[in-house]
Amino acid sequence: METYTNIFAEHLNNEAVHFFPELAASHVEVVFRSLDERSSATLYRYDIVGGEEHYPVMVKQHHKQAKTATAATQRPLRYKIDGNEKYELESQALMTIESYFKELNDGRFGFIRVLDTLPQYRALIMIESQDARLHTMVLSNNRLQRKLAPNDLHPVLYNAGAWLRHFHSLSPDETIKTVYETRNDYLETITSFTDFLTEQTGDHYYFKNLIKILHHYANDNLSERLPTGRFHGDFSTRNILVRDDSQVIVVDTLAKWHVPIYEDIGTFLTWFHINQLQVFTQGLSFDPKWIQHCEQAFLEGYFGDDPIPYNDITLFKILVLLDKWTSLVTHFSRRNWLWQRITNRVRERLSVKRFKAVLHEALDSLKTGEKYEPSR
């Protein structure tokens, strides 16, 4: 039985000259490099070689959706999608991004070139970027390593913010659904999160008090109708590729919905405070002034000369944090072997402690009206 590895290799060999016309006069060879199994897709990596030319290519094959049992710990999901749609949505999103940024012709922004699609295999063929991930660059600047000077990432983060603003401005079409866009929608969302967390943790007093405070600050700060844009859905450092000239390339989006712009912004900024290093060290991994500098560079890139609505962004940082908290509770409620339950319990306690610390600092910034600057 022919394997997908061979099927894709044969297709790449047959279409290599179509993908790369400069190979027409050369003997073409397709070399399989690696296979990476992930939860929702398998990544096949190849090299297409001809003469002195060499092109790294990746085939991303989405898995068929497997139905899973619904449990009492199924958390609130706002962006429900049939897993079998992901191939089509990601293909369309990447091609939309390529078309938009190619026409924009701004040297700060790159894109992934889509070579082909194979619907019968739910597979997407694209040029594989060899560029560094912003995720790795940031983590390498923890207090023990400090591989970067204070301003080294400023142009990258500024460009990432500017990229997101362009992405949010993509024109909607009939396939793009607006999920929520008002202050009341925001309040309903955070209430669904706190209701779930109350049920799962039994901490009625904490979450009852929290939702009361959040309603107060949301009513005081958020406008009735919120600015919306095309939703990336996972705008995080691991999905941002960086070239030597600080050009950024953003990947891994379905671009299916319109939501308030602050959710993508909040997702990006919150990661700096609750990534695994920060959870493990309880916020001691990075210099807080450096984090503040990173956040400010990103926000300046996004908002340009416009005023930065810090309180609105902080409220959405809290929404993102609560969303991740519900995910945490769901993950650690799964039945595992004894040693896994023990380690999960330790990780859960560290995570909750860190989440609460970040949450309380955000609430303090809303109380004082000052820009959110974490103490550590």
Image: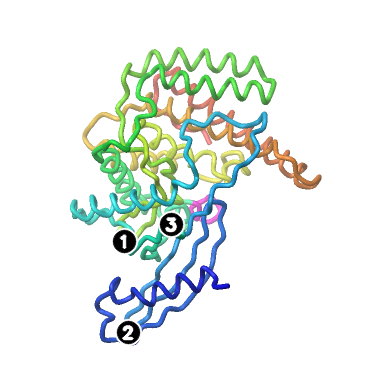
In the picture of the structure, the residue carrying the numbered disc 3 is 133
Percent x, y of residue 204: 65, 16
Q: Residue at x 33, y 52 (%)?
A: 94
Instruction: Compare residues 134 and 286 and report the one nearer the observer.
Output: 134
In the picture of the structure, the residue carrying the numbered disc 1 is 113
In the picture of the structure, the residue carrying the numbered disc 2 is 52
Mark in the foreground, 2 or 1: 1
How far apart, in angstroms, are the residues tagged by discs 1 and 3? 17 Å
Residue 185, picture quadrant: top left
Give yes or no for residue 143 being in the magenta stretch: yes
Asked if residue 309 lies left or right of residue 133, the reply is: left
Q: Residue at x 37, y 60 (%)?
A: 117
Q: Residue at x 81, y 45 (%)?
A: 338
Q: Secondary structure at mark 3?
A: strand
- Few, some or many residues within 10 Å of mark 2 (<14, 14–19, 20+): few
Percent x, y of residue 217: 43, 16
- Few, some or many residues within 10 Å of mark 1 (<14, 14–19, 20+): some
How far apart, in angstroms, are the residues tagged by discs 2 and 3? 27 Å
Q: Residue at x 38, y 13 (%)?
A: 220
Quadrant, the N terminus: bottom right
Percent x, y of residue 128: 39, 65
The vertical placement of 306 against 363, above or below, is below
The vertical placement of 144 against 216, above or below, is below
Q: Secondary structure at mark 2?
A: loop
Going by the numbered disc 2, the residue's amino acid type is Glu
How far apart, in angstroms, are the residues tagged by discs 2 and 1? 21 Å
Q: Which residues are magenta?
A: 139-146
